Amino acid sequence: MDRQSSLWTGIAVAALLWFYMFSPWTSGVSNFWLNMSISATILCCFVIADRPGPFRINLNWKKIVGQFLSGCLIAFALWGVFYIGDKLSQLMFGFARTQVDNVYGMKEGTSPVLIAVLLLVLIGPAEELFWRGYVQRTMSGTFGADKAMLITLAVYALIHIWSFNFMLVMAALVAGAVWGLLYRLKPSMLPALVVSHALWDALVFIIIPI
């Protein structure tokens, strides 16, 4: 299978996985966090199978620390954006808080510590490596960097549509736009984006819920 076929297969698989996890017809059939962990692992397989990979490990400690600190800064800044956005959305949409609470309801019945670990170690990194490090990077070679960023963003947001939760789709759109733009401007920031995605997930969902 060539790279383009593998790419679109990966996107189709991601869409099916997100449908199963979020659609009202299939969500709740089995544990959401188990499904999410399995889905993240499957996405990682596409990243690992791709050659060349999204980035090479650099053992320069100054760069590693710089990437980590940049990722933390992006995560906290993005949390701030969502905090303000939450307050504004409640003023604009009567359904906003209910839909946000429905998203938070997905953590019921599962240990918050376990969820945080999964988000930090597996789910957050896997999503960023797949969507920016694999999908957007591979599309850039075919469509150009700008179109690749927009297509990746559209797909990333739309696969959440099966939740029928406007606030969740918008959250994916906003966060995806930030990560996608940063990757477009500086692809070498991918490690920082991986850190930011993982930390932001844990912050907004477990550590400092909005």
Image (spheres, rainbow, N blue to C red):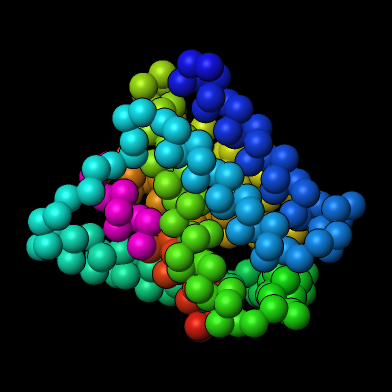
Whether residue 99 can be seen here: no
Image side of residue 161 versus residue 83, left or right = right
- The residue located at (63%, 41%) in the rendering is 14
Q: Nearer the viewer, residue 151 or 132?
A: 132
151 w.r.t. 17: above or below: above
- The residue located at (41%, 18%) in the rendering is 142
Q: Nearer the viewer, residue 202 or 168?
A: 202
Whether residue 75 can be seen here: yes
Q: Is residue 141 magenta?
A: no
Task: Examine the image and state in which quarter residue 31 appears.
Answer: bottom right
The quarter of the picture where the C terminus appears is: bottom right
Which residues are the magenta region? 187-195
Residue 73 coordinates in the image, percent (x, y): 30, 69
Image side of residue 45 versus residue 144, left or right = right
Residue 8 coordinates in the image, percent (x, y): 58, 26
Task: Examine the image and state in which quarter residue 42 appears.
Answer: top right
199 w.r.t. 197: above or below: below
- The residue located at (43%, 39%) in the rendering is 48
- By secondary structure, the bulk of the magenta-drawn segment is best described as helix
- The residue located at (51%, 41%) in the rendering is 45
Q: Nearer the viewer, residue 176 or 57?
A: 57
Q: Is residue 189 magenta?
A: yes
92 w.r.t. 169: above or below: below
Query: Which residue extends farthest right?
Result: 25
